[in-house]
Image (cartoon, rainbow, N blue to C red):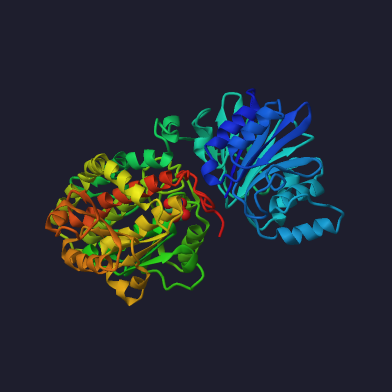
């Protein structure tokens, strides 16, 4: 779960590598480093800390001068964040950067130690560097091939051989890697935004392929070292989209991008007022046969699946199970040829979600991926694919990816309900018409609730713990609200089905404890209000996120603070109601002095178990 980059060209390599790494810090940011060929030697500079610390070190101590090199930003797996555990790592004639985990590194380390090799760091990566050096026979491609045959686990590698100062090599298995090309220069990177400043043209490296990058261009071989040609892709994300665009943080920028992200995601999938997912491989006919649906994902993506469950079951009357990917993959799940397994993932590279997808396929289920990152592993391996068109999401806390995942869930539920005959075309058109209004509704909520949420966030700043409560769709949404707050503010919080509180959790309520309640579903609002009164009378401070209609019906004093959002089609309310929860989390993090874009201990793309 790190970011790797590489450059071959005529520019100042150190500058290019640092710039490219700055677009990958979302993948990890506990240390960073670069290695550059300088006068026939490999010069390495690395440090614990963020990329800024590496930049400071390069400016203060020494900046390698050269035009070919590799770089790394780390999220520690083996060995604590420290200078010595930072990448690049070297053997005598080889220097590498690595993203992933080498599962058999201890075995390989023993093998190398028995042959007189010693190690400076605790990392699995140094073992690979030493193994490359041990196996080196003067031919880099043969050496890489031989080492790859011995590696178990996941890796994307950027490799420099001291004897070949005009080139770098790259390979991968499981972990993502792209190869960018421009005139007389080329790049490797874990993700497309890293190269957008220089080029939009890139190749996707497949498992076990090896790329050789020189100023003459890039060549590829397969695992048998047979030359291969690959399709050149062009990124449709631009630089500006990958930058902050005037906002203080990516998180608030991405919250503000949500109306556009929903619009971009839904509009191409609507034809004649009805959902149309044919280009994603989904037709009304193909949906008829599914007996049940299992939605598998992690974190925020799983919460989008929870909303999907309520909506699909309500409209299409098909049973839906929502499962956490890390649980699904190890519990022999009951899915087979009559079932659809939906995998939701922003990155498309989440290790557990990818494993869940493979397991579902192995069991004969049909798989549908709902993914944001184009060409990612999950996108490529699923039977059917709907892209969320949110554009690059840089902040670790997912916002616009979540809202587009919801939007796709609605489109899919409408299509499924049509297929099952549980909703008429006329009713479906009515729902689609309501969905089309959601981008404007979200823009309205952002504009009207930001100041209120900012103010309420000042009341949360000293909280030790809080609860999110709701019923039905409001409960599904509360899960996401709670995760958002805890991940960026570091305040403990739980989400609870409001009706479940008195079965134990209400004992936590004490004087002044904030309880955030979501109330947008008319049929359960009176019940939720009763639950609010119960916790209020035990000292809780109530923050109520509700529709304007609900707010009008409230008696004075029920809530301490109310955030009103306009009432719209009730089934779609999570799309607007999530916005105040996101903004509340953002400002609470700011008030506590946290960097909301890079919360501690987290990484954007969780490519390890
Ligand atoms: C939430 O803000 C987090 N970024 C996290 O829960 C995330 O949704 C989860 O790790 C799944 O990631 P994915 O969508 O890339 O698979």
- Looking at the image, which is closer to me, 87 or 469? 469
On the rendered structure, is 370 left or right of 188?
left
Q: Residue 187 location in percent, x, y?
A: 59, 33
The image position of residue 323, as x and y in percent, is 41, 66
Identity of the residue drawn at 55% across and 60% down: 609
From this viewpoint, which residue is outermost toward the front? 511
The location of residue 391, given as percent across then percent down, is: 40, 40
Camera-side residue of 559 and 289: 559
In this rendering, is residue 436 above or below 422?
A: above
Q: Is residue 382 visible?
A: no
Q: Using the rendered image of the protein, determine whether residue 290 is visible from the camera's viewpoint.
A: yes
Q: Residue at x 26, y 61 (%)?
A: 473
Where, by quadrant of the figure, is residue 50 drawn? top right
Q: Is residue 334 above or below residue 8?
A: below
Q: Residue furthest right?
A: 116
Q: From the viewer's perspective, is 370 left or right of 531?
A: right
Between 194 and 499, the residue placed more toward the observer is 499
x and y percent of residue 559 in the render? Answer: 22, 58
Q: On screen, 331 above or below 285?
A: below
Q: Report the label total.
A: 0
Furthest residue to the bottom?
A: 503
Q: Quadrant of residue 256?
A: top left
Between 269 and 47, the residue placed more toward the observer is 47
Q: Residue drawn at (49%, 64%), measured in percent from left and top? A: 326
From the viewer's perspective, is 291 left or right of 418?
A: right
Q: Quadrant of residue 236?
A: top left
Q: Which residue is drawn at the image coordinates 35% and 47% (left, top)?
A: 458
């Amino acid at each position: 779960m790190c970011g790797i980059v590489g450059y071959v060209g005529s520019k100042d390599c150190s500058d290019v590598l640092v710039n490219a790494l700055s677009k990958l810090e979302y993948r990890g940011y506990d240390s960073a480093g670069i290695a550059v060929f300088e006068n026939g030697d490999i010069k390495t500079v690395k440090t614990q800390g963020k990329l800024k610390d590496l930049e400071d070190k390069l400016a203060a101590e020494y900046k390698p001068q050269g035009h070919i090199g590799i770089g790394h930003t780390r999220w520690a797996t083996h060995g604590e964040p420290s200078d010595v555990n930072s990448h690049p790592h070297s053997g005598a004639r080889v220097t590498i950067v690595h993203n992933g985990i080498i599962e058999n590194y201890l075995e390989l380390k023993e093998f190398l130690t028995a042959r007189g090799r010693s190690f400076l760091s605790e990392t699995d990566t140094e073992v690979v560097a030493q193994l490359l050096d041990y196996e080196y026979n003067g031919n880099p491609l043969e050496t890489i091939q031989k080492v790859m045959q011995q590696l178990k686990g996941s890796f994307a590698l950027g490799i420099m051989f001291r004897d070949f100062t005009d080139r770098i090599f790259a390979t991968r298995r499981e972990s993502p890697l792209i190869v960018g090309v421009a005139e007389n220069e080329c790049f490797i990177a874990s993700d497309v935004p890293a190269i957008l400043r220089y080029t939009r043209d890139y190749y996707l490296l497949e498992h076990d392929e090896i790329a050789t990058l020189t100023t003459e261009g890039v060549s590829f071989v397969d695992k048998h070292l047979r030359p291969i040609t690959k399709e050149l892709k062009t990124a449709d994300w631009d630089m500006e989209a990958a930058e902050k665009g005037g906002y203080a943080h990516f998180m608030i920028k991405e919250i503000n991008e949500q109306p556009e992200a929903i619009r971009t995601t839904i509009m191409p999938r609507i034809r004649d007022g009805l959902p149309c997912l044919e280009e994603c491989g989904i037709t009304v006919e193909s949906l008829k046969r599914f007996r049940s649906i299992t939605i598998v994902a992690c974190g925020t993506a799983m919460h989008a699946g929870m909303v999907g469950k309520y909506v699909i079951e309500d409209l299409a009357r098909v049973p839906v199970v929502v499962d956490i990917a890390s649980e699904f993959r190890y519990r022999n799940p009951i899915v087979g040829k009559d079932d659809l397994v939906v995998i939701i993932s922003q990155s498309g590279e989440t290790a557990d979600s990818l494993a869940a997808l493979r397991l579902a396929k192995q069991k004969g289920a049909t798989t549908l991926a709902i993914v944001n990152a184009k060409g990612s592993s999950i996108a490529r391996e699923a039977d059917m694919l709907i892209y969320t068109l949110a554009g690059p999401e840089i902040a670790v806390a997912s916002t616009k990816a979540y809202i587009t995942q919801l939007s796709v869930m609605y489109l899919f539920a409408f299509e499924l309900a049509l297929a099952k005959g549980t909703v008429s075309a006329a009713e479906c058109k009515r729902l689609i018409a309501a969905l089309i209004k959601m981008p404007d509704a979200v823009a309205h909520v952002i504009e009207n609730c930001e100041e209120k949420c900012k103010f309420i966030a000042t009341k949360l700043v000293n909280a030790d713990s809080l609860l999110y409560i709701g019923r039905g769709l409001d409960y599904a949404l509360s899960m996401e609200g709670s995760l958002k707050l805890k991940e960026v503010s570091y305040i403990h919080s739980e989400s609870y089905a409001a009706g479940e509180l008195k079965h134990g959790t209400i004992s936590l309520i004490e004087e002044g404890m904030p309880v955030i309640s979501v109330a947008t579903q008319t049929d359960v609002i009176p019940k939720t209000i009763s639950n609010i009164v119960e916790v209020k009378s035990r000292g809780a401070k109530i923050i109520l996120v509700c529709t304007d209609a609900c707010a009008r019906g409230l008696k004075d004093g029920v809530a301490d603070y109310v955030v009103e959002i306009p009432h719209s089609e009730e089934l779609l309310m999570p799309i607007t109601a999530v916005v105040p929860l996101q903004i509340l989390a953002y400002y609470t993090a700011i008030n506590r002095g946290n960097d909301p874009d890079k919360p501690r201990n987290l990484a954007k793309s969780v490519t390890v178990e």
